Image (cartoon, rainbow, N blue to C red):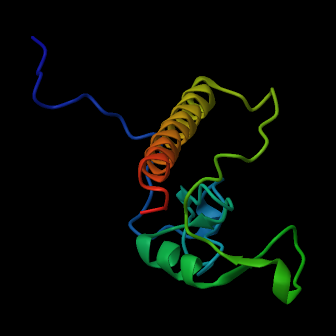
Amino acid sequence: KINRNKPNLTPLTKMSATPSPADSTLPPCEICNKKIAIYCCPRCSIKTCSLECCRSHKLQSTPIDGNSEQNSTIICNGKRDRTKFCSLRQFSDSQLASDYHFLEDVLKVSDSSKRIYQGIARDYKNNGHFP
């Protein structure tokens, strides 16, 4: 008989509550360097271990391409750059879905701006001035 209420999950490895980075093949947290990094920032790929480290990362300036100049740093917002180049090797079904949704959003904004422009042009034609 199958128990439908409780899933049958098997842990991949047995780890202690606070494993050290040497205990695992996963990289250490790039913020605190104390625990194993289990999260990856979608924007800049910084590896973090907790929500606290993730928030700390978002408040720090991150150099772009290893350049430490003032004008080449960003404050990470944690959102994936939807326009970033993706090689064919890295292209997956999820990337295809993301690209499709991005193009749908672009189309929606384009249609909305056309309606606004047509409304302004119609008002100008009828009244002789902009609203």
Q: Which picture quadrant has residue 57?
A: bottom right
Above or below — where is 67 with respect to 104? below
Q: Position of residue 55 (x, y in %)?
A: 48, 77
For the point 43% across and 45% down, which residue is it?
119
Q: Which picture quadrant has residue 78?
A: bottom right
* Number of marks in picture: 0
The foreground one among 107 and 123 is 123
For the point 81% across and 26% down, which residue is it?
88
Above or below — where is 66 with respect to 14? below
The foreground one among 31 and 96 is 96
Q: Describe residue 61's horizontal placement relative to residue 72 as left or right.
A: left
Q: Which picture quadrant has residue 63?
A: bottom right
Q: Position of residue 102 (x, y in %)?
A: 57, 38
Q: Residue furthest bottom?
A: 70
The foreground one among 112 and 83 is 112
For the point 65% across and 26% down, which residue is it?
92
Image quadrant holding the C terminus, namely bottom left
Q: Describe residue 8's horizontal placement relative to residue 69 as left or right.
A: left
Q: Position of residue 10 (x, y in %)?
A: 35, 34
